[in-house]
Image (spheres, coloured by chain):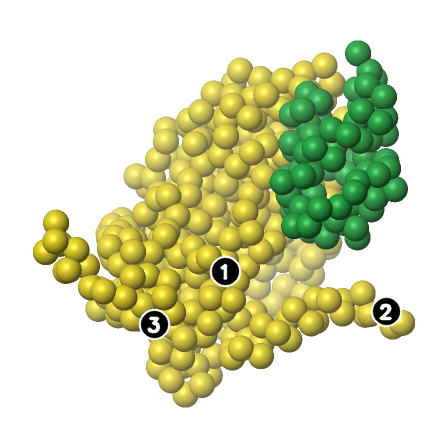
Chain colours: A yellow, B green
Amino acid sequence: MTILAKFAPLREAYEGLKAVGYDPFSIQFDRILSPTEGIINGRRTILLGTNNYLGLTFDPSCVDKAIEALVEQGTGTTGSRIANGTYTGHGALEQALAEFYGRKSCMVFTTGYQANLGIMSTLVGKDDHLILDADSHASIYDAAKLGVAAVTRFRHNDPDDLYKRIRRLSDQPGNKLIVVEGIYSMLGDTAPIKEIAQVKRETGAYLLVDEAHSMGVLGQRGRGLAEAAGVEADCDFIVGTFSKSLGAVGGFCVSDLPDFDILRVACRPYMFTASLPPSVIASTLQALKRMQEEPGLRVRLMNNARRLYDGLTAAGFNLGPEANPIVSVQLGSKEVAIRFWNALVQSGLYLNLALPPATPHGMALLRSSVSAAHTTQQIDTAIELFTQIGRELGVIAPEPVLLRAANG
Amino acid sequence: MTSSADDIIAEIARTLGPTLNSPVTITADTNIVRDLGLDSLAVMNFVMELEDKFDISIPLDKIAEVETVGDLARTIQELRGA
């Protein structure tokens, strides 16, 4: 038995998946042409699964800032902030994010995953309690494993269940930290954050909101769900990422807690990894500026999201509960989802195949993420391809909706 | 109001019923992952139901230590006694 023998069942499942066609977990792009187009297997393909919400990855001003920093400051920092120090850019980005959120402090991390991993695992100590939504992202579950606090799950998006579970812990000492996400990454549903904030107030817990998929997407200024719902004052910590709306890589946490900065010498996923390269910091800083200068991006994004959501609903597909930039088609079986996904990629549409256990309730999903940079034509092409293949595979009714209208 | 280990095992078996694909006789020695074929998410969801039935909180790290139905029953008994 080799050390990798334990992965035999995983290997078998993965080989079975790859045997159908493309490898959904390692798709090869020959080239990326723009935020919304790439080339797969020589074929021009619409990118509808990249979380590139504002389409800023090719923004000329962001590219220019990155090049400038690259030339002036080099390719990397070659070490962590605590060992190799802080460059001007890291400090400037932290200040800009704190200002954007109207908060006292900000810490920048090398990835969004590390921001969740670091902040949550460090905030809660031995006698504290971490209280997670059951459908939390893997980074939140991994933070739970890295930390030493007791971890409790509550039913997805259920404030009453959250209240009940905190009440069960009421005779136990320690602080309680509730963790929710602005937009959940699999189905695109938002947290009922007003009600959750109320539970937080009633129970004296702290509240952390992961706005990874909602920053730049929701709220008057693009701060996320907490802003849109008017409960920012109840959110003690906001975590976010640079790898979605801001088009780069990295993560952050902002807070008003006066002693927040002590985490810089306590948070291991912050301390023991190299800091972001100056070019990434520079493009992110510029993208943050672009996001604020151009609220029209958000309007275009939501129009595109609504168009895709309504188009797929009209075609008869079963979608998530809300029209957000994450639009997921729910399919009856894994096998159908895998065939459907392959047919879409072969027809020139790339999106994500999401399978259990990464999905809630064992769902098999075709997950789209819409961008402000998509044209109306691209969205309509996506709807047409979905409809055509959906009919071929018997996922939706073969007859045009016209017939039903005539009968009615 | 402490239940015996057998009562708790019977309650666990009742809770597990709908989640299982094929009928299995559940005893204290039943291994939750190996014998019941539940993935990590299914185990966490099933534990959530037990938390409600017994009105207790079973922290995730406690679940990680549990292998058999008997282990789980003991954990529940301890948490209820506490």
Q: CA distance from mark 2 to mark 1?
A: 33 Å
Instruction: Identify the amino acid type marked 3.
Output: Glu
**Foreground of the two, A51 or B61:** B61
Residue at label 3?
Answer: A392
Residue A340 x, y percent position in the rendering:
42, 69
Q: Which mark is residue A3?
A: 2
Q: CA distance from mark 3 to mark 1?
A: 16 Å
Instruction: Determine the chain carrying the residue at label 1.
Output: A
**Foreground of the two, A112 or A303:** A303
Residue B53 seen in this snapshot: yes
Residue at label 1?
Answer: A333
Which residue appears at 46% of the width and 57% of the height? A332
- Rendered view: A227 above or below B23: above
Q: CA distance from mark 2 to mark 3?
A: 44 Å
Around disc 3, counting alpha carbons within 10 Å, would you say few (fewer than 14), some (14 to 19), or many (20 or more)? few
Around disc 2, counting alpha carbons within 10 Å, would you say few (fewer than 14), some (14 to 19), or many (20 or more)? few
Instruction: Determine the chain carrying the residue at label 3.
Output: A
Which residue appears at 76% of the width and 67% of the height? A7
Identity of the residue furthest to the left in this view: A406
